[in-house]
Image (cartoon, rainbow, N blue to C red):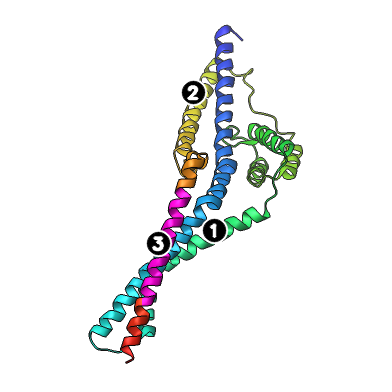
Amino acid sequence: MNTSEASISEKLVEVRQRVIDTLLEIDDIKLQVNPQLLAQYAKTIGYLEDDLFKWQLKARRCKRRFALAQAAANKHEPIALDEIDSTLDDEFAEWEVQLAERLDDQLQLLEALAGSRPLSPSEGRELKELHRKLIRRLHPDTHPDLPEDARRFFLIAQSAYENGDVDTLRVVDTATEDYEEHADTVNLSEDDATIELAMAEAQLNVAREQLDVLKHSHPYILAELLSDPVELTHRTHELKMEIERQKEVVRTYESKIASLMEGNTR
């Protein structure tokens, strides 16, 4: 191998390593960082936002219920709350669906948190080490020629990493030891190495763009808020105060409806 070929081959190895490092960071954000951020957000702010949405919906419905009841009273008609409620069920159907979806998402997250087991520091280190090893060995973006079994092992490894399942990663590591890294550049001609280098650089650019999008998207952008105790306290206080205001709106209009009904029955 001449000096030029050696230089290109070394550059190829370097770029491929950057691709792997970038893919590792992408996976870490998708499978570990983002789920942790979502869980932390749900436990500190998210549950309050869902509660506020619920009380805002109740307040709007109470206002509308009173308006319909008042309209009937103004016409000297009987106030049929059952009919009014039926009308409101139709009017607020989409909002109720949104509320149900939010509560279901919250329930699923809480169930996942309840079923999870915190990893010890040593298990956490092993989890990341095994994941890095298996990414280098099996990632389809860097090893497109691996057989279908390898792709299946890769998906199993991704799922195990997401769930913090060290035992499964150990099994996959043992089962895939025969898959050698496809980083052999020694036997590439200068032309072939140049082509491979261009492809690797293009792949690196795509991976970096994906990483940049992740870092500027929800839920990763929540990290700044969640790491600021002052802002976090301020936000939770605002939400709790607004929830109380919406509860007061509900109480006010329920009282107005009760008074209206009392006058309507005289």
Q: Residues within 10 Å of mark 1 (few under 14, many from 20)?
A: some
168 or 71: which is nearer to us?
A: 71
Q: Residue at x 56, y 47 (%)?
A: 40
Range covered by the magenta-colored residues: 235-255
Whole-percent x, y for residue 142 in the image: 58, 32
Q: Main secondary structure of the magenta part?
A: helix
Instruction: State which quadrant residue 76 falls in.
Output: bottom left
| Amino acid type indicated by mark 1 | Gln
57 or 106: which is nearer to us?
A: 57
Instruction: Quickly name the residue at label 2.
Output: 198
Distance in Å between CA atoms under marks 3 and 1: 23 Å
Whole-percent x, y for residue 12 in the image: 56, 20
What residue occupies the far top of the structure in this picture? 3
151 or 212: which is nearer to us?
A: 212
> Could you say whether the residue bearing mark 1 is in a helix, strand or loop?
helix
Q: How many marks can you see?
A: 3
For marks 3 and 2, give the one nearer the viewer.
3
> Could you say whether the residue bearing mark 3 is in a helix, strand or loop?
helix
39 or 246: which is nearer to us?
A: 246
Whole-percent x, y for residue 77 in the image: 27, 89
- Mark positioned earlier in the residue sequence (3 or 1): 1
Instruction: Quickly name the residue at label 3.
Output: 245
For marks 2 and 1, give the one nearer the viewer.
1
Q: Relative to residue 1, is residue 84 depicted above or below?
A: below
Instruction: Quickly name the residue at label 1.
Output: 106
Q: Residue at x 63, y 43 (%)?
A: 158
Q: Residues within 10 Å of mark 2 (few under 14, many from 20)?
A: some
Q: Residue at x 56, y 52 (%)?
A: 43
Distance in Å between CA atoms under marks 2 and 1: 46 Å
| Amino acid type indicated by mark 3 | Arg
What residue occupies the far bottom of the structure in this picture? 266
